[in-house]
Amino acid sequence: MARWRRDFLREVTDGLGRLGLSSCPVCGGSELQVLARPRLLLVGGRGARGWLQPPDADETIEYLVAVRCSLCGHQLLFDAEQYRHGDGSLLVRGDAEEETAPGEG
């Protein structure tokens, strides 16, 4: 299973803080947590328009960063591409401490 790189999570956390997200918009709690595993959103394709759609239809998977309130459980989703800088991988495999993506060092 994949997870976000730790340095990417720090960048997202800093970016959301600069935008003013310091508390839950539902309960006002300040216990927000950026989750380590990405959320996937299927855009287009058969699931969006029904099973009668032609097989060559465009479909895209978007990777989202989830932020969850530890008090009420409300989750906010943010497009990972908005926080991407450069061409480096944003994801690593598993829970291992190793941060080297395949093909790197």
Image (tube, rainbow, N blue to C red):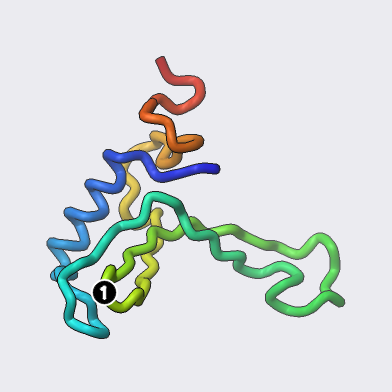
Residue in the picture at 72% in, 72% down: 47
Q: How many marks?
A: 1
Q: Hey, which quadrant is residue 76 in on the image?
A: bottom left
Label 1: state its secondary structure.
loop
Residue in the picture at 83% in, 75% down: 51
What is the x, y in percent for residue 74? 35, 76
Taking depth in this image into account, of 54 and 26 the one nearest to the observer is 26
Q: Hey, which quadrant is residue 86 in on the image?
A: top left
- The three-letter code of the residue at mark 1 reads Leu
Q: Quadrant of the C terminus?
A: top left
Q: Where is mark 1, residue-wise?
A: 71
Q: Is residue 59 left or right of residue 101?
A: right
Residue in the picture at 40% in, 54% down: 81
Q: Callout 1: 10 Å neighbours few (<14), some, many (20+)?
A: few
Asked if 54 appears above or below 101 in the picture, the reply is below
Residue in the picture at 39% in, 58% down: 65
Q: Quadrant of the N terminus?
A: top right
What is the x, y in percent for residue 9? 29, 48
Q: Hey, which quadrant is residue 23 in on the image?
A: bottom left
Asked if 105 appears above or below 18 in the picture, the reply is above
Asked if 8 appears above or below 42 in the picture, the reply is above
Q: Which residue is outermost to the top?
A: 105
